[in-house]
Image (cartoon, helix red, strand yellow):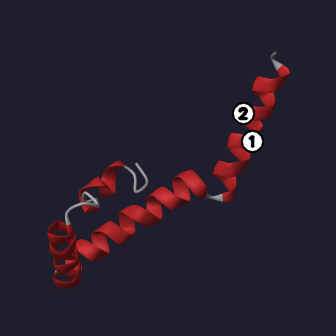
Amino acid sequence: AVLGEELRHRLVPSERPDLLADAWRRALCRADERVRDGERARRRVMREFSLEAMVRAYEALYLAGLRR
């Protein structure tokens, strides 16, 4: 999923504007959830999209190519 498993609860079906409005309302009214979800998102970005993660991914790709 685009947001990752930890933030999956933030996704709503595109054909349900009522659910989107509810999700925005919750996000705006519940600061504790916003902070918690922000921390989860930051951890995911650091884990999966940091420079170190990108280097590991390229290294794995190159090594896989060498084994062919």
Q: Are marks 2 and 1 in contact (CB under 8 Å)?
A: yes
**Eyeballing the image, is 67 above or below 62?**
above
Q: Residue at x 81, y 17 (%)?
A: 67
Q: Which mark is residue 60?
A: 2
At label 1, counting other C-alpha atoms closer than 10 Å, the crowd grade (few under 14, some 14-19, many 20 or more) is: few
Q: Quadrant of residue 28?
A: bottom left
The residue furthest front is 15
Number of on-image labels? 2
Q: Quadrant of residue 15?
A: bottom left
Residue identifier under label 1: 58
For the residue pair 52 and 5, the one nearer the viewer reads as 5
Q: Residue at x 22, y 81 (%)?
A: 31
For the residue pair 55 and 68, the one nearer the viewer reads as 68
User: Residue 36: horizontal and vertical position, in percent?
Assistant: 29, 69
Q: Amino acid at mark 1?
A: Tyr
Q: Is residue 25 left or right of residue 65?
A: left
User: Residue 20: horizontal and vertical position, in percent?
Assistant: 22, 70
